């Protein structure tokens, strides 16, 4: 077994093609790169909290690191737009999930590709790209979706101010038709345990 969260995080960044893909994202858009790092590291920590094996926690962390990798195909001015997007622009934005799946398939990671494709699916079927609902969405994907939404709310966007930690968690818990309550509880437990205990080699979510 690796040494708790820290060992899993170290192994996460040693995985094949991780530095290459993250370097490409950094060159393309700083905010997307920052978001991917936050989500990837927190996903790995949630994985260890819920009892995943080291390999499973690392795979969950990779899914978090790459969930928005398809945004490499979206121009920076659209990613950081401060105006209301048109329907055509939203179609371009939503295509990042399928684009990310294609990229990870090309890198020989079909399991990660499936999670990346589905990370915007929602329990009630209102998500995209396939309108999956309930248990048709894998447990791993449901965890990534919750962590992704949490970091987005905590970080803010050009069109929305960042929310305090407690308010972000409250919104996730209230959205029971969208986000798996067990996945939300896993995130709450992870963040709560880390607030109570100082852990080396754990990077806090900004």
Image (cartoon, rainbow, N blue to C red):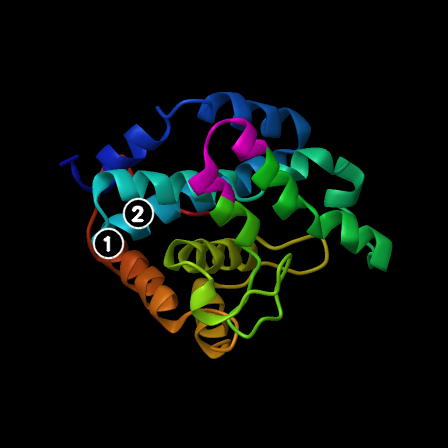
Q: Please tell me which residue is depicted at 63% across the width and 45% down the height of the picture.
A: 98
Q: Secondary structure at mark 1?
A: helix
Q: Position of residue 118 (x, y in %)?
A: 54, 54
Q: Is residue 52 magenta?
A: no
Residue nearer the viewer, 12 or 196:
12
Q: Please tell me which residue is depicted at 67% across the width and 60% down the height of the picture.
A: 160
Residue pushed farthest left? 1
- CB of mark 2 within 8 Å of CB of mark 1? yes
- Say whether residue 85 is left or right of residue 20: right
Mark 1, Cα crowd under 10 Å, few <14 / some 14-19 / many 20+, is some
Q: Please tell me which residue is depicted at 56% across the width and 35% down the height of the picture.
A: 33
Give the Cα separation between the discs numbered 2 and 1.
6 Å
- Inspect this view and state whether residue 31 appears: no
Vertical side of 148 occupied by 175: above or below: below
- Inspect this view and state whether residue 181 appears: yes
Figure quadrant of the N terminus: top left
Q: Please tell me which residue is depicted at 52% across the width and 21% down the height of the picture.
A: 20
Residue range in magenta is: 103-113
Q: Residue beneath label 1, please?
A: 49
Q: Position of residue 6 (x, y in %)?
A: 24, 36
Q: Secondary structure at mark 2?
A: helix
Vertical side of 188 occupied by 61: above or below: above
Vertical side of 41 occupied by 169: above or below: below
Mark 2, Cα crowd under 10 Å, few <14 / some 14-19 / many 20+, is many
Q: Residue beneath label 2, please?
A: 45
Residue nearer the viewer, 50 or 135:
135
Q: Is residue 111 magenta?
A: yes
Residue nearer the viewer, 151 or 62:
62
């Amino acid at each position: 077994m690796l040494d708790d969260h820290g060992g899993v995080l170290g192994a996460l960044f040693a995985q094949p093609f991780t530095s290459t893909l993250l370097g490409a994202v950094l060159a393309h858009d700083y905010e997307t790169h920052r978001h991917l790092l936050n989500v990837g590291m927190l996903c790995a920590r949630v994985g260890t909290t819920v009892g995943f094996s080291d390999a499973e926690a690392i795979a969950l962390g990779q899914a978090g690191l790459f969930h928005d990798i398809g945004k490499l195909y979206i121009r920076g001015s659209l990613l950081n737009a401060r105006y209301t997007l048109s329907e055509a622009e939203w179609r371009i934005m939503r295509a990042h999930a399928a684009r990310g799946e294609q990229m990870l398939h090309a890198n020989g990671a079909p399991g990660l590709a499936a999670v990346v494709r589905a990370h915007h699916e929602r329990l009630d079927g209102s998500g995209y790209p396939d309108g999956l609902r309930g248990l048709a969405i894998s447990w791993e994907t449901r965890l990534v979706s919750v962590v992704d939404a949490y970091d987005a709310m905590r970080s803010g966007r050009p069109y929305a101010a960042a929310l305090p930690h407690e308010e972000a968690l409250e919104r996730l818990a209230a959205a029971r038709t969208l986000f798996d309550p067990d996945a939300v509880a896993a995130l709450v437990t992870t963040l709560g345990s880390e607030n109570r205990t100082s852990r080396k080699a754990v990077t806090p979510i900004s």
